[in-house]
DNA sequence: CCGAATCCTTTTTGATACTG
DNA sequence: CAGTATCAAAAAGGATTCGG
């Protein structure tokens, strides 16, 4: 298997670029952990980032069908975010990454 | 489990930051795929990046004990890179990420 | 409360040049 | 071949502000 010739490689390339964006894995992880819909401000607080960055990441996740955005026309408006089915299938992968860190007691720089 | 209070969270945070750096997952992935030592220029060619970036990423990986660097005083000097044992344990995680992309035929933006 | 536009700051990248 | 230093350009982050 030649990595440079694999037709799915460009897709994986895009996934890596996406996952690499700041706070994005965090957002996926907390949506997975909490196992319930989270509001914008919940997410902002949990990942500890600016609203600008959270907004950008949620938009990218939504555009890539990894996050569902649901809103209700209450007053004030109610919005919540959940993982899509496909993103839920990625959750074990993300979890295993966390497990790896925990099990090997890494000291990263 | 409260993500913001988990003591390993800062370690995971660092892992995510590390993995998020451009080309870094690529480098781990090809070292895993090829299953043999690779030279600097091999890696540079396979990930298609500048020598500056490849150099930086390899240094970071080495500093975090994810990559072994071995050199021989031949002429010209011979250097090769391999995954450390601990990084090899992370390989299935990375692989599952790739599998996820392949199995779900994602169309990422 | 949700979140986008602006605009400025910080970070990252990579071309080039150079050493061993 | 295997890198590193420099430096300019590009990308990304975030504080602030503002509207729905």
Image (spheres, coloured by chain):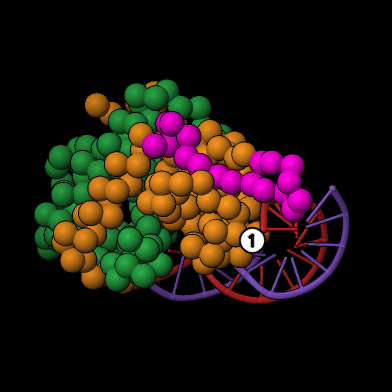
Chain colours: A orange, B green, C red, D purple
Q: Residue furthest front?
A: A74
* Quadrant of the image containing the N terminus of chain A: top left
Residue A9 in percent (x, y) is at 39, 31
What residue is at 38 percent from the left and 30 percent from the top?
B101
Residue A72 falls left or right of residue B76: right
Please tell me whether residue B103 is drawn above or below residue A40 in the rendered image.
Answer: above
Residue B2 falls left or right of residue A96: right
What residue span does the magenta drawing correspond to? A71-88
What residue is at 61 percent from the left and 65 percent from the top?
A50
What residue is at 28 percent from the left and 67 percent from the top?
B8
The residue beneath circle 1 is: A51
Taking depth in this image into account, of A34 and B22 the one nearest to the observer is: A34
Taking depth in this image into account, of A13 and A31 the one nearest to the observer is: A31
The answer to whether any part of residue B13 appears in the image is no
Q: What chain is tagged by disc 1?
A: A
Image quadrant where residue B59 sits: bottom left
Residue A91 in percent (x, y) is at 35, 42
């Amino acid at each position: 298997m030649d990595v440079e010739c694999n037709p799915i490689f460009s897709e994986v390339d895009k996934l890596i670029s996406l996952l690499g964006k700041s706070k994005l894995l965090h957002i996926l992880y907390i949506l997975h952990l909490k196992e319930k819909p989270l509001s914008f401000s919940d997410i902002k607080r949990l990942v500890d980032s600016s609203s600008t960055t959270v907004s950008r990441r949620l938009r990218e996740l939504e555009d890539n069908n990894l996050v569902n955005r649901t809103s209700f026309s209450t007053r004030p408006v109610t919005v919540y975010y959940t993982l899509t089915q496909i993103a839920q299938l990625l959750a074990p992968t993300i979890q295993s990454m966390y497990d790896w860190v925990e099990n090997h007691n890494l000291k990263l720089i």
